[in-house]
Image (tube, helix red, strand yellow):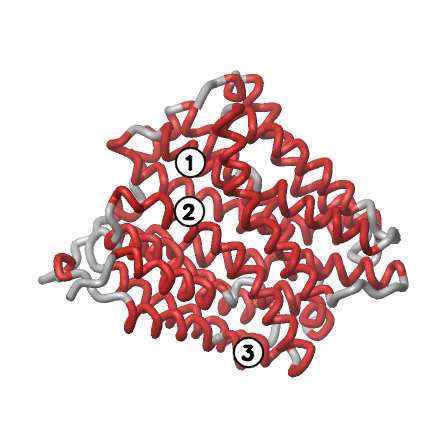
């Protein structure tokens, strides 16, 4: 008897949460590792960036494979790879270079679970239902990352940083178990013979050039890159920023820094969905520009709030998280609608690749500016560091307004 397709979604949402629990492990233990391994802020940021480097390396191959074989098989490999990366951080990482390797492996594992997980759903759900289920799947990214901060923080407080990676390494394996037992394989996806993947299938350069020639689609991709640079840099350094605020003001926050970071991320979950609703009413391009400018102002205000009441700092952190995510779904939906149907798949691949490229450079830029402007013991250094990641959204708005992108209807 065939299970109704909609019944698969709760299992995939649960699996996605498990697969994402390793996302914030390093952000939670960044400060103690920095002290134990004698890292400067640039090196700390590069380790965070290595996660996104691994994602970028793996995502083209992982997504291309899902067109050849059942995405379940790719998902299984991704869960195992993410678990290996986390275990490597727990037991074999002992400094800058070894951490780069294991964090990149962890990121590659996420790449082989997140998008293939979406493909598992799209292959099994009727087209009339699909958009609703995809909206839930993408929204649960914020829930998974928020829980990652919370769980990692609790484990670190009780057992230390080694235990964070060791215990969380079980979560991607749990995701694999859920998908294996709860999501049946596709009968139509049985592949016989060798899988012939050409380099142009993994990196469709010719199609990417066509995508970038479309000014509207290119604008959404460029905006998404600026968006993810700010988003992932902020998430990578938020726990360290809360720790600095506590030490600088000489007063404790209501909750631990890791718990606060998790709570802040939960507020971002509905922001993307609600932001897309606003964009439908006033225009996607206009909404993206408004959100990026507001996010920049709030980001600088957050950085300048050190020494103030913890209530003000948390309120600004929540507002910043909301406005960082308020244009996320809008940017992706805008690209999907504006891209030509014959190159839509390539456009979405380039969108994801450049987006996580922003995630790759963002944490490193943040750490580099911290070093150059007085290290993380200086409140002014944090202002410059936040300015270095929010400025890209402002530059994007200035550039696209000159081209008339913000006045287009989409």
Q: Which residue is at a point 25% across and 56% down the rendered structure image?
A: 5
CA distance separating discs 2 and 3:
34 Å
Answer whether residue 351 is visible to the viewer in this image: yes
Q: Dot 1: few (<14), some (14–19), or many (≥20) neighbours within 10 Å?
A: some
Answer whether residue 61 is visible to the viewer in this image: no
Which residue is labeled 2 in the image? 135
**In the image, is residue 302 above or below residue 288?**
below
CA distance separating discs 2 and 1:
11 Å
Q: Which residue is at a point 68% across and 44% down the rendered structure image?
A: 320
Mark 3, secondary structure of its residue: helix
**Is mark 2 in CB contact (under 8 Å) with mark 1?**
no
For the residue pair 308 and 226, the one nearer the viewer reads as: 308
Mark 1, secondary structure of its residue: helix
What numbered label is drawn on residue 90? 3
Of pointers 3 and 1, the one earlier in the residue sequence: 3
**Quadrant of the rendering where the N terminus is positioned:** bottom left
Residue 95, percent from left and from top: 61, 72
**In the image, is residue 376 above or below residue 199?**
below
Residue 90, percent from left and from top: 55, 78
Which residue is labeled 1 in the image? 333
- Please state which of the two labelled residues, at mark 3 or mark 1, is closer to the viewer: 1
Q: Dot 3: few (<14), some (14–19), or many (≥20) neighbours within 10 Å?
A: many
- Please state which of the two labelled residues, at mark 2 or mark 1, is closer to the viewer: 2
- Please state which of the two labelled residues, at mark 2 or mark 3, is closer to the viewer: 2
CA distance separating discs 3 and 1:
38 Å
């Amino acid at each position: 008897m065939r299970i109704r397709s909609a019944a698969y979604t709760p299992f995939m949402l649960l699996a996605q949460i498990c697969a994402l629990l390793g996302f914030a492990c390093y952000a939670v233990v960044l400060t103690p590792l920095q002290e134990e391994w004698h890292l400067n802020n640039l090196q700390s940021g590069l380790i965070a960036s290595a996660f996104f480097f691994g994602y970028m390396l793996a995502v083209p191959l992982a997504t291309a494979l899902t067109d050849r074989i059942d995405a379940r098989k790719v998902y299984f490999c991704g869960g195992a790879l993410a678990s290996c990366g986390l275990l490597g951080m727990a037991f074999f990482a002992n400094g800058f270079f070894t951490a780069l390797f294991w964090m990149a492996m962890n990121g590659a594992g996420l790449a082989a679970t997140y998008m293939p997980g979406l493909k598992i759903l799209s292959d099994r759900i009727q087209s009339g239902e699909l958009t609703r289920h995809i909206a839930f799947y993408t929204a649960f990214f914020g829930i998974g990352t928020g829980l990652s901060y919370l769980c990692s923080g609790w484990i670190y407080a009780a057992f230390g940083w080694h235990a964070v990676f060791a215990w969380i390494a079980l979560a991607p394996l749990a995701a694999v178990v859920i998908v294996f037992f709860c999501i049946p394989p596709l009968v139509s996806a049985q592949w016989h013979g060798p899988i012939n993947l050409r380099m142009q299938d993994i990196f469709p350069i010719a199609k990417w050039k066509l995508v970038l020639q479309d000014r509207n689609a290119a604008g959404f991709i460029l905006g998404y890159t600026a968006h993810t640079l700010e988003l992932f840099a902020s998430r990578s350094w938020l726990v360290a920023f809360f720790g600095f605020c506590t030490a600088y003001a000489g007063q404790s926050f209501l909750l631990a820094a890791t718990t606060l970071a998790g709570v802040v991320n939960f507020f971002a979950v509905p922001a993307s969905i609600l932001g897309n609703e606003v964009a439908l009413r006033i225009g996607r391009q206009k909404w993206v520009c408004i959100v990026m400018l507001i996010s920049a102002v709030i980001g600088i205000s957050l950085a300048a709030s050190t020494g103030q009441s913890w209530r003000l700092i948390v309120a600004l952190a929540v507002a910043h998280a909301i406005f960082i995510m308020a244009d996320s779904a809008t940017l992706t939906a805008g690209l999907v609608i504006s891209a030509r149907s014959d190159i839509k798949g390539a456009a979405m691949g380039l969108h994801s690749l450049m987006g996580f490229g922003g995630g790759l450079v963002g944490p490193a830029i943040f750490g580099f500016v911290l070093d150059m402007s007085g290290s993380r013991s200086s409140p002014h250094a944090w202002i410059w560091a936040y300015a270095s990641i929010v400025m890209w959204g402002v530059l994007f708005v200035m550039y696209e307004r000159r081209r008339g992108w913000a006045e287009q209807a989409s």
